[in-house]
Amino acid sequence: MFTVDGGVWYTSFICQFAVPWYMEYEYVHMDDVPRVDLSENDDVPPDHDIRSIDEALGLENVRANVWYIEPGDEISYHAHSEQEEVFYVLEGTFSLKLGRSGETETVEAEPGTWWAAEPMVGHGHRNVGDETGIVLAFGAPAVDDVGLNPHELDE
């Protein structure tokens, strides 16, 4: 490996030519990511819309979504077996339920609030405001890790 003009180049005994190594990247504007109505999906409560940022960017190792949650609607209290999640309120006011079964805490979250839950730890949020709330959500690893009932998990 050697550096030329700030870029990293790799060589090997197999390749006689220096080949540049660059990290792949993508970018997208929010307006170019389709907003999908999930109300016809039986596994998702009605009136939830989502923008799948991870799909738009072709991400393989992390899930990234923007959720639109109507007043009074919620992402119910649940946990994941493998996935760690982190959330950020962009718009709206939410009541968060966080923690293991029997040890939960209820917290109010407004724009600018972050929260996270590691695997096997319960979390959920309800829009307690008067307008559509918007939450940015990240989860890793990017696996299909359906929500589990935290009350049924072994401690």
Image: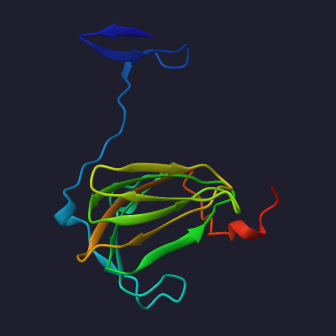
Between 38 and 112, the one nearer to me in the picture:
112
Q: Residue at x 55, y 83 (%)?
A: 43
Between 11 and 56, the one nearer to me in the picture:
56
Q: Residue at x 67, y 69 (%)?
A: 148
Q: Residue at x 67, y 57 (%)?
A: 103
**Residue at the right extreme, as displayed:** 154
Which quadrant is home to the N terminus? top left
Residue 38, given in percent of the width and then of the height, sits at 40, 83
Residue 97, given in percent of the width and then of the height, sits at 53, 63
Residue 56, given in percent of the width and then of the height, sits at 33, 61
Colour scheme employed for the rendering of this structure: rainbow
Apparent side of residue 93 relative to residue 143 in the rendered image (left or right)? left
The answer, for residue 132, to whether it is visible in the render is yes
Between 24 and 13, the one nearer to me in the picture:
24
Apparent side of residue 146 relative to residue 87 in the rendered image (left or right)? right
Q: Is residue 7 above or below residue 103?
A: above
Which quadrant is home to the C terminus? bottom right
Residue 67, given in percent of the width and then of the height, sits at 35, 68
Q: Is residue 123 above or below residue 36?
A: above
Q: Residue at x 77, y 64 (%)?
A: 153
The answer, for residue 18, to whether it is visible in the render is no
Between 72 and 6, the one nearer to me in the picture:
72
Label tally: 0
Q: Is residue 129 above or below residue 83?
A: below
Quarter of the figure with residue 28: bottom left
Q: Is residue 54 above or below residue 68?
A: above
